[in-house]
């Protein structure tokens, strides 16, 4: 059973002040995040296929993606799109040159 409105009590909440280094605006200190590892993933494109085709894929098959070979790739940090770039070869390894920050 719900209490009558006259019995409801409202208690104000007192929030403490934020201390030094707690600035949440632009220019905040982020030095303490410098050692945090993040996952960077580079995606060349996507494809939508049936589950039946998926389970029947074999080595050597070609899966067409939704982008042209010269289209920029997506660069995601912990799953969030942060930039786009171009695929390049550096010392015989595949790399990405950042072309746009999103």
Image (tube, rainbow, N blue to C red):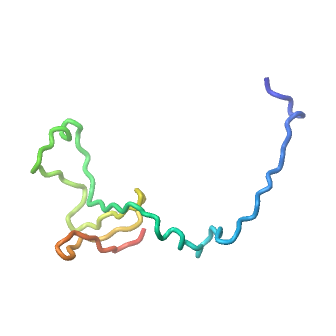
User: Which residue is at the front of the view, 37 or 50?
Assistant: 37
**Which quarter of the figure is the C terminus placed in?**
bottom left
How many marks are shown on the rendered structure? 0
Relative to 98, is 61 above or below? Answer: above
**Which quarter of the figure is the N terminus placed in?**
top right
On the image, the x and y values in percent for residue 100 come to 37, 72
Choose top left, top right, bottom left or bottom right for residue 26: bottom right
Outermost left residue: 60
Choose top left, top right, bottom left or bottom right for residue 52: top left
Which residue is located at x 90 percent, y 34 percent?
6
Choose top left, top right, bottom left or bottom right for residue 22: bottom right
Relative to 43, is 26 above or below? Answer: below
On the image, the x and y values in percent for residue 9 come to 86, 39
On the image, the x and y values in percent for residue 33 come to 51, 68
Q: Seen in the image, is 26 located left or right of residue 82?
A: right
On the image, the x and y values in percent for residue 25 come to 62, 70
Outermost right residue: 6
Q: Seen in the image, is 74 located left or right of residue 11?
A: left
User: Which residue is at the front of the view, 92 or 83?
Assistant: 92
Q: Seen in the image, is 36 located left or right of residue 2?
A: left
Outermost top residue: 1
User: Which residue is at the front of the view, 65 or 9?
Assistant: 9
Relative to 82, is 2 above or below? Answer: above
Which residue is located at x 58 percent, y 73 percent?
29
Relative to 76, is 6 above or below? Answer: above
Which residue is located at x 17 percent, y 73 percent?
92
Q: Seen in the image, is 53 located left or right of residue 9?
A: left
């Amino acid at each position: 059973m719900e209490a009558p409105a006259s019995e409801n009590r409202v208690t104000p909440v007192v929030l403490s002040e934020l201390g030094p280094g707690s600035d949440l605006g632009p220019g905040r200190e982020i030095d303490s995040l410098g050692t945090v590892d993040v996952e960077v993933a580079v995606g060349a494109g996507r494809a939508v296929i049936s589950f039946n085709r998926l389970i029947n894929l074999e080595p050597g098959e070609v899966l067409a993606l939704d982008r042209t070979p010269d289209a920029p790739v997506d660069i995601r940090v912990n799953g969030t799109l942060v930039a786009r770039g171009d695929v390049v070869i550096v010392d015989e390894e595949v790399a990405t040159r950042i072309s746009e920050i999103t």
